[in-house]
Amino acid sequence: MSRSYRYIKVRPIAGALGAEVEGVDAARPLGGEVVAEIRQAFLDHLVIFLRNQKLTPQAQLAFAQRFGQPVEYPQLKGLPDCPLITPVIKLEHERVNFGGIWHSDTTYLECPPMASMLYAVEIPPYGGDTIFANQYTAYETLSEGLRRTLDGLVGVNTSTK
């Protein structure tokens, strides 16, 4: 999708989803027009990356609040001075992803949040991948017969392993 933006620069990074958003300092107050364009980039690309940000937990929370009401993560404790920010720490010796299994954050809630935000403080020089999947594309590329089979079914999400 090719859309022009007035306040930000958006560069797609893969065919199925994902884009880098430039021209945003998430630690500073943003105008409504900028927030609207970031939201549109998220809707267009499903995953967006804002590189080279320097955020305190309070600044990360303030940025998140521009897009909706953040919720406390139900199964993990947040930071003492900012309980809506949950640290995700993976130690060097750990080989399994955070959470231990494939997951989609808090989709099991009665009213799940619109998105998850992850602020990477320290990343390895290679590996450490977070893998995203475009479920729209997955569905659209199924055969017509399989789509008919799936249409009308209801998915049930749970937090149990």
Image (tube, rainbow, N blue to C red):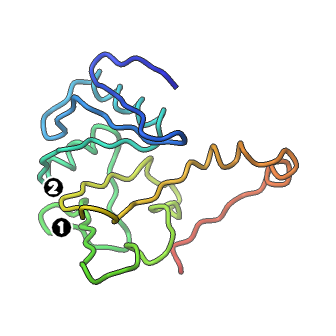
Spatial distance from mark 2 to mark 1, Cα to Cα? 8 Å
Which residue corresponds to mark 1? 79
Provide the secondary structure element on which disc 1 rests. Answer: loop
- 127 and 55: which is toward the camera: 127
16 with respect to 152 (left or right): left
Q: Which residue is mark 2?
A: 57
Disc 2 secondary structure class: helix
Residue 6 % position (x, y)? 31, 16
Q: Amino acid at mark 2?
A: Pro
Query: Left or right: 39 with respect to 17?
Result: left
Looking at the image, the residue that sits furthest to the front is 126
The amino acid at mark 1 is Leu
Q: Is residue 92 above or below residue 24?
A: below
Tell me what residue is drawn at x 42 percent, y 44 percent: 47
Nearest to N terminus: mark 2 or mark 1? 2
Verify CB contact (< 8 Å) between mark 2 and mark 1. yes
Give the vertical position of 43 relative to 124 (above or below): above
Q: Residue 39: image x %, image y %? A: 38, 33
Q: Name the spot of residue 139 as percent of width and height, x first.
A: 70, 47
